[in-house]
Each structure stands twice: as C-alpha cells, then as structure tokens.
Image (cartoon, helix red, strand yellow):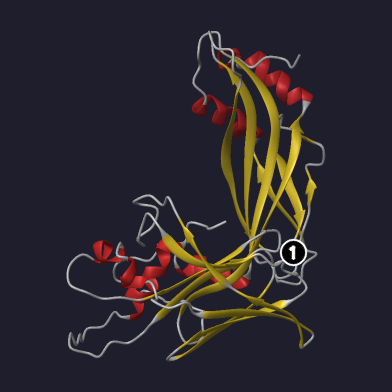
Amino acid sequence: MLKPFFSLLILFAMFSSCSTDVDIYADYEDISIVYGLMDSSDDTTFLKITKAFMGPGNALVIATNPDSSNYNIKLDVRMKGIQNGVEKQTIVFDTITITNKQAGDSVFYFPEQMVYYCTETLNSDYEYNLTIAKPDGDLSSTTAVVEDFFISSPNRYINFMSDKDIEWTSAENGKRYEISLVFNYTELLPGETDTLHKFISWQLGMRKSINQDGGEEMYIGYSGDVFYSTLENELEPILNVKRWTGPVDVIIACASQEFDTYLEVNDGTDNLLSEVPVFTNINGGFGLFASRKTITKAVDLSVQSELKLITQYPELGFKAKP
C-alpha cells in the first residue's frame, strides 16, 4: 500500500532549487522526483514519479493541479532483479489512478493521483535495478531487499507484571528498526448488543543494527507500568461498560540503509541557521528507492497481567473471558 511519505518528496525540489541568485527567466528544466519502497511481503509495489514545478503564488495551491507535477505521457518504467551479477527477473510497471484522496493527505493533487505499480512477487535474494526512460534522459537507482527476520521474545505470552525486553534477530539488508505494541480488546457499551473491536498502540522506540549482514541479536525494553498507565490515559471509564482483553501485536518495522539515511536527513531537528541537507539515491533525479520489511507477532496477555488489569483497574471495566 502507499505510505504517507509522498508529502516529503516536494521538499527535494524545494531544497535543490534554493539559491541566493534567482533567474525568473531561466529555461525550463525537467527535474524528476521518484519515491518507492520495496517490500517482498507486499502483493503490489508502487512507485511515485513526479516532476518539480515552479510558478507564481502559493506552491501548495499549484501542487493540487495534476499538470503541475504529473508527466503527460506514460513513462517506460522497468525493474530488473539481479543475483550474483545475473539477471533473473524483469518487471515492467503499469499505471493506476488512486482515487478518493482527501485534501491534506499530501501536497500533491487530489482526489485522484496517478502512480506506477507492479504485482510481481519480489525475491528478497535479488538486488533490484530501477530504470525510468524519459524523452530527455533516463533515471536509475538500485536497492537490495530487506529479508525476513523473526521476533524471538515474547514467545506465546507477553508479561506486563515487570519490565521486560522485546528481542529479535536483525535482517539481512536491514538497518533501522522501529518497535511498537498494539493492545487489542473488545468493548460492549451499556444498552448495546454489538461488541466493538478496538485497539491501543504505543511506540517503544528505535534501534539500529551494527551492520546489514543480519543475524545480530537485538532488543528493546518496555515498562510494565507504562502499559497500565497507557490504558488508564487512553480508555474512558464508562459506567457498566464491559471489556475483554485480546492479543497484543508486537510490530517491528525495518528499513534499509538508504531509507534510514533518508529519515535521518528529514527528521526536522535542524535549526533555521543550519544548511538543509539533501539525500537522494536517484541517478538523474531526486528521491528515494529503498526497501523495508514489517514483522508482526500476535501474543496473548499473560494470565497474571490480565488479572492485574481486571482487579486493580476496575474502573476500566475489563472482565474475565467466558
């Protein structure tokens, strides 16, 4: 699925055109901006290919016009899977229009937006070479694919009676790991007959592997007290409400080295006096072609953790499972 980084792409054009000398009569130059993230577990791979633009007035208003950033021709977009220097796979991208976009989803035009896509299965053992043929020159980039990895702890149950660790083994071609927990529960409001499925999520933080070779034992700690305080803050204490605990999803999202660098450059921590850096791995243009992988493991709440939630936080309305 498309991810919410498209709004950052226009920054590449803004950053690259910053200068103290401005020639408003300069000849038009076609500057391409490419954004794509590879994930071998996705059934569809998307690429966003646009062009930089300049015009009088508010740039955010100009961006809502498809002609400002969209090419008026279908580009020849191909991707080759390479293993040990041998071409193993060739993928040709087609175009599709994403509909029902809302104002504020991104600085690009709405309610429709054209993207390039393919549905071929990606092989995590391959390195993928991207080429985009344009009338005035080609664009290219290369990325390895983040391979599978596994979460070793928790195993079947997660315990919030004390402070514990989430443990996993790093992925080959992976660098940055962002970890979150999602507590699922069901809720029956007083006077209602339908049970609602709900969830509460929170971020545990980020870790980076030493290298991208894979196999590194990694961990991040979590606080049992934070689990209960989070539920107290997020859940409304409704009189006579009935709630039942569900599984806890342990989610680890892994980014490749290029994706990590992109996120670091665009983290927004620089002050106004700092020179704005630019990161791109698109030859002949600007943007990002990288890889990611997200692993989710569902585990049950331990008996002791559930009992504490029921007995020590009665105002939240959690009941023992029938």
Q: Is residue 31 left or right of residue 203?
A: left
Q: Position of residue 140 (x, y in %)?
A: 55, 84
Q: Tell me which residue sits at (74%, 61%) in the image.
A: 170
User: In this view of the protein, can residue 193 be seen by the observer?
Assistant: yes
Up/down of 21 relative to 299, above or below: below
Please name whichever residue, 189 or 297, is drawn nearer the observer in this view of the structure: 189
Up/down of 94 relative to 312, above or below: below
The quarter of the picture where the C terminus appears is top right
User: In this view of the protein, can residue 275 be seen by the observer?
Assistant: no
Q: Is residue 252 left or right of residue 150?
A: left
* Element on which disc 1 rests: loop
Please name whichever residue, 281 or 120, is drawn nearer the observer in this view of the structure: 120
Q: Is residue 126 left or right of residue 234?
A: right
Please name whichever residue, 282 or 67, is drawn nearer the observer in this view of the structure: 67
Q: Which residue is mark 1?
A: 171
Q: Quarter of the image holding residue 81?
A: bottom right
Q: Is residue 70 left or right of residue 321?
A: left
Q: Quarter of the image holding residue 201?
A: top right
Q: Tell me which residue sits at (40%, 62%) in the image.
A: 7
Q: Position of residue 129 (x, y in %)?
A: 64, 81
The quarter of the picture where the N terminus appears is bottom right
Please name whichever residue, 200 or 159, is drawn nearer the observer in this view of the structure: 200
The kind of residue tagged 1 is Ala
Q: Quarter of the image holding residue 165?
A: top right
Q: Tell me which residue sits at (71%, 32%) in the image.
A: 247
